[in-house]
Image (cartoon, rainbow, N blue to C red):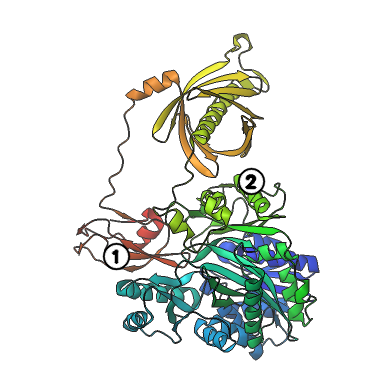
Amino acid sequence: TFEKLLIANRGEIACRVIKTCKKMGIKTVAIHSDVDANAVHVKMADEAVCVGPAPTSKSYLNMDAIMEVIRKTRAQAVSLNVSICCSCFIYRKQKSQKGVTFIGPDTHAIQAMGDKIESKLLAKNAKVNTIPGFDGVVKDADEAVRIAREIGYPVMIKASAGGGGKGMRIAWDDEETREGFRFSSQEAASSFGDDRLLIEKFIDNPRHIEIQVLADKHGNALWLNERECSIQRRNQKVVEEAPSTFLDPETRRAMGEQAVALAKAVKYSSAGTVEFLVDSSKNFYFLEMNTRLQVEHPVTECITGLDLVQEMIRVAKGYPLRHKQADIPINGWAVECRVYAEDPYKSFGLPSIGKLSQYQEPLHVPSVRVDSGIQQGSDISIYYDPMISKLITYGSNRAEALKRMEEALDNYVIRGVAHNISLLREVIVHPRFVQGDISTKFLPEVYPDGFKGHKLTDLERRQLLATAASLYVAEQLRSQRFLGTQRIPIAKSKRSSWELSVHLGDGIYPVAVSKDGSSFSVEVDGMKLNVTSEWNLASPLLSVTIDGTQRTIQRISRNASGETSIQFLGTVYKLQILTKAAAELSKYMPEKAAEDTSSILRSPMPGTVVAVSVKPGDMVSEGQEICVIEAMKMQNSMIAAKTGKVSHLKSLKTICNLSNRIE
């Protein structure tokens, strides 16, 4: 193969490439920004070179710096994962570093498929089904409105060079079209260095299903089955699986053959993904082709047994494919959940930043794979995608894969940042998802008022109360011991029962606990439950059996006033546990008044203020835009919650880095 390969990427995908290179005996060179100096991919690689400051345009997309690293390290091949960077590299390689091989398709395929306008025209010529729309570049907001009216609402406005849900907006009327044009063009320029936009008919309530293709330089091409990617928020995938519950063999074959036809039409040679929208009648339409290794590729590897990174390296070296179409199987079922540092209670996931104070992957669960680029102590910053990891489970069938995913999510320990474990777990156990009744509108349809966490049944509420009370008592008993003996041996406590008051949500529940060996008998709502565990209170995970039902819980926090947070069934619940006497006395404690935020506009996430639409003294009405915040390359409009006058604006630095608020 190659002796040395440079990986011009970061995070989990860089780590993924390094793992295969190690297996193949290839030395690796990592590049990194200054804030990524201690990143996992830097530690895994044989060599690492800093290429600039934190912003991607000055580091991971800095082609001059990358070309210099290639020259200095004498890398024979380079792996990139951003199309604009790939085509730029190939062009410059042709001018200078002619001995360097790119792990991926040639520049024609990258540029043709990276441009959504050109790719759509090529798809039409290759007899691939396409979505009706405008096949040119939209010049300005006025033209966008005119085109949208001609196509008919709703329409999708998206970046020609885009991907990953960035630079995309759905518009249902003229006003949303103008706003969508502005935000999409700004996001496109920021993320891809190209603000060109196109407009096409929005297919309402479709499935998003993609076909993995693999092609070599000898004219051979395969389709490696499909991936179901319909669970999305803000046009970004959240849960993927392979195969799809929706496709029959005939539709799968038709989609696969069209995907291969498109790959051959652009002389594609590497791994790539052709994405389709599929309606309820199984009509499918070409969406785009991604000329890179997709985030969700592990589910395809699980059901086919192929290492796609290894296949890409072999193709780049000039070898023909080792397999025929008939050799490609569908063995079992695989599910992937994208674990993000996001608050799922805000628009299904607004980014969260911070340091991972505690981090433990659920690798002890059978048939679990975790692709990550972070570790305990890693920082989640505003500069990059907030992905923590890709959590993949595999089973002989879908039910088995989903059950393992449920267990894996319960056993995943992430502290220090907000995360979307609760949302992921709710999705995979929801009856509609289990039945395969899904579309790209799944989240807004199932949670029309936003995600609120798991809603406890009466039985689950009793289980949580019993577990929390038992945990409280176990901790009280432990605090009486020191080095395995009583602190005051002459005053041994013979107490075996406790009367507690547990505050959960809007309810206060009397709970009686009695100890029986290593088990506790707990009475809640007049019903007795038996709670058993090893009660290892030092472990972040606690396996508890409640009347024969096993649950894995996590105690997130606690304090001296009896307040505790417990992760139960994926959702974190806040409780307060007091003795009966303490609960009586707590009535006399004054309550802290809630902060009046009615006149404050507070940023829901850390980010950069890219535009301020008002000035001191302006009158603003409810719903009017005040400013635009950019975080993780996504732009969000901040609007006024009520009508009033802008009294003053703090400095932008203060808004972004200190208080995250605009008064």
Q: Residue at x 57, y 55 (%)?
A: 435
- The reply to whether residue 563 is in sight is yes
Observer-nearest residue: 627 or 333?
333
Image quarter of residue 96: bottom right
- In front: label 2 or label 1: 2
Q: Residue at x 60, y 87 (%)?
A: 126
Observer-nearest residue: 314 or 428?
428
Element on which disc 1 rests: strand
- The reply to whether residue 384 is in sight is no
Q: Amino acid at mark 2?
A: Glu
Task: Compute the Cα span from label 2 to label 1.
Answer: 43 Å
Q: Residue 633 appears at what percent x and percent y?
A: 47, 68
Q: Is residue 269 placed above or below 587 in the rendered structure?
A: below
In the picture of the structure, the residue carrying the numbered disc 2 is 407
Image quarter of residue 229: bottom right
In the picture of the structure, the residue carrying the numbered disc 1 is 625
Looking at the rendered image, the quarter that the N terminus falls into is bottom right
Q: Is residue 483 placed above or below 428 in the rendered structure?
A: above
Q: Is residue 637 placed above or below 410 in the rendered structure?
A: below
In primary-sequence order, the first of circles 2 and 1 is 2
